[in-house]
Image (cartoon, rainbow, N blue to C red):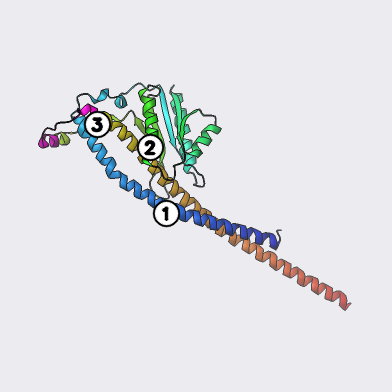
Amino acid sequence: MASVQDLKRRVRSVRNTRKITKAMELVASARLRRAQARIEAMRPYADRMLELMGGVARVSASPQRLPLLTRREPQTTAVLAVTGDRGLAGGFNAQILRRAMALGRELEAEGQTVRWLVSGRKGRSTLSFRRYDVAADWTGFSDRPAYSDAQAIAHRLSELYIQGEVDRVIVVYNHFESALVQKVTEQEVLPIPEHLLETDAEERAQDAERGDFIYEPEPEEILERLLPVYLETELFRALLESAASEQGARMTAMRNASKNAGELIESLTLAMNRARQAEITQEILEVVAGADALGE
């Protein structure tokens, strides 16, 4: 049985740990609110981008000839795993890497070659440890990604696709549902989905009511410039969703850790009181035994 002093040290250690987990929970909560605000601020921009692309595509003669819209029989697929730079976030990183590696096995079973790309130090270290050949990685911004980070990733993905090194690009990231729920999402970002440029009868009727527009430069050239921006926007959205998911997962993990620490403190305190009572009882018995010996 542990001594009273040992139990006191353990209680003190667990209390210090609980202070740290409480502080980390509060920091993650503040960062989560900021990440949610950034996602909400970006949505109107993303919606306007889709609307603009659709409008230009409706008057383009042959948008399918653009490089980022060209569809090929997939022989090589790039998988981009979006993870965090730090741990202590529950299963946030593990579930992304588990799904990405499962996807890689599925693609290889279909006879495709997989090119690995990763965002975040945790993903890079895990894939490197498992001896995956990582073609490119980006780190240092998982907590607060900037649009320039999405641009860097989009430029590399576009380069691989246009040069024919990959025939398809799939991004695996955590979609933010709530602080308690993060949903692993697979999104094919290249080639850019054709349904984004499709029009329905209502939209064509609205265009007819507005009349004809004169485009300068030509619609195909405008669309060619818009497609890379759309790719950057989608990647930026994925990075923001991942950042919010990471903070939500960390906040929940630290809250659970603080709760477990509290329960452990109660258990250790009870054990310490029992040990102290046992010591007092033992001392009383020794005193009584000594008094009896002296009385004889």
Q: Is residue 131 left or right of residue 187?
A: right
Element type where label 3 sits in the image: helix
Quadrant containing the C terminus is bottom right
Q: Is residue 131 left or right of residue 28?
A: right
Amino acid type, residue under disc 3 in the picture = Leu
Q: Residues within 10 Å of mark 3 (few under 14, many from 20)?
A: some
Q: In x, y percent, where is residue 200?
A: 19, 33
Are dots 1 and 3 in contact, CB under 8 Å? no
Cα separation, mark 1 vs mark 2, equals 23 Å
Q: Which residue is mark 2?
A: 150
Q: Nearer the viewer, mark 1 or mark 2?
A: 2
- Examine the image and state in which quarter residue 212 appears: top left
The residue lying at 73 percent from left, 67 percent from top is 279
- Look at the picture and state if 204 lies above or below 267: above
The residue lying at 13 percent from left, 35 percent from top is 205
Q: Which residue is mark 1?
A: 30
Tell me which numbered mark, 1 or 2, is placed earlier along the sequence.
1
For the magenta stretch, what is the residue range? 205-221
The residue lying at 58 percent from left, 58 percent from top is 16
Q: Which residue is mark 3?
A: 197
